[in-house]
Image: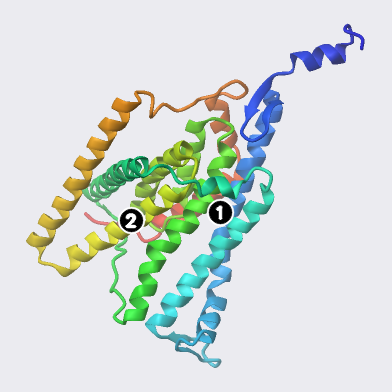
Amino acid sequence: MNVNDPKDQKSKQEPYTYINGFGFMPQTNEEERKHLSSVCTLLFFVLLLYFLLKRLILIPSYYLSGILGTHVWFNPMTGLITMSEEAYQTASLICYTLSMLLVFIVLRVAVRKEFHLRRLIWLPTFRYAINSFFLLCGTALTGLFCAELFTRLLHSLGIVLPNTSFQLPASGGAFILYFLSITLFPAVLEELLFRGIMLQMLRRYDELFAIAMTSLLFAMVQGSVYDAIFAFIFGMGLSYFAMRNGGLLVCIASSFVIRFLRFFLWMLQNQMESALASAAILSILLLLFVAAIVCFYFRVHHNPHAFDLKQDENVLTNREKFSVVLINPLFWCLGILCLSRFFINLQFIN
């Protein structure tokens, strides 16, 4: 081999970067930018696909709900659909589950070489899992506080967000289906999609960028501004512990319990007397907050660098990474769609 060959000299000077699961691979600035752009385009596309599927699958879900034995009546003359509470909750659950699963399958096929399911079911020690759970509770409380603060700020400016409260299903079957649709199914499906695949796809660029982008995408699929703010902050905690634990079981369990606690506190607020409900809710939140602080102290005392994040700017700087996101047209399409969903029913008061 001729050592003076310009091609050989170029190959020697070619920078290398570590990619999870692949080891050190040659990358240049332009190649890394193109790869990040393609990854972001894929992620934005599958989320747009998710919203589209929820529209397309809705009517077939009503038919499927009727096939499963629930009471659904179709009027071919008027096109109206009348259904029982069980049928509505069954159709909603089918529509959400199928949309999530189809998006998961599309993304799983696209990144089959970078996705390892066995790594996601790894379970840490019981002590570490309990500590992580209470820290995630503290993150969730922070998200609820910020969401409540934001809504109150908008109200002080004369902007009232749409009221998302509704009447709980009266029948037992419909209530169980509704409970599963807001706790267990989102906890499993959303963690598999966002922390299981999306986070791992973005992790190669650095941990801080991956956590921020995954949390932003997680917030975009929520149904209200309040839930989006909560999901962004809570998603950052979930993404962090998914990286540190190396698995999703703690994140899935924590997400389920946090969703259950939100539902339980909402039930207390609406079913009990105002003063008694406020005292009970405040006591529960205070206990969780104190437990989170204690767990945070022990985690930092045991490992002072426990919450340090790896930031790798060997190829692209953080500014370049976020610029790649901002110039992507699908990102703005997704953002406009989410904002229209969040603020379509805003009310302005004097």
Residue 281 at x, y = what percent?
16, 55
On the picture, is 187 further left or further right than 62? left
Q: Does residue 8 appear to the left or right of 182 in the view shown?
A: right
**Residue 110, can we see it?**
yes
Residue at (44, 82) in percent of width and height: 87
State whether residue 332 appears in this view. no
Kindly give the residue lying farthest to the left in the view shown: 275
Task: Name the residue type under label 1.
Answer: Leu
Q: Quarter holding the N terminus?
A: top right
Residue furthest top as drawn: 4
**Where, quadrant-wise, is the C terminus in this rendering?**
bottom left
**What amino acid does circle 2 point to?**
Val
Marks counted in the figure total: 2
Tell me the quarter of the picture where residue 57 sits: bottom right
What is the x, y in percent for residue 275? 7, 60
Image spot of residue 69 (x, y percent): 49, 87
Horizontal relation, residue 334 to residue 300: left or right: right
Using a 10 Å C-alpha cutoff, classify the residue at mark 2 as few (fewer than 14 neighbours), some (14 to 19) or many (20 or more).
some
Seen at 59% across and 37% down, the residue is 327
Front residue of this view, candidates 158 and 107: 107
- Picture disc at residue 257: 2
- Per the image, label 2 sits on a secondary structure element best described as helix
Q: Which residue is mark 1?
A: 47
Give 52 or 97, whichever is nearer the viewer. Answer: 97
Q: Quadrant of residue 298?
A: top left
Quarter where residue 162 is shown: bottom left
Colour treatment of the image: rainbow
- Viewed as shown, does residue 3 lie left or right of 158? right
In primary-sequence order, the first of circles 2 and 1 is: 1
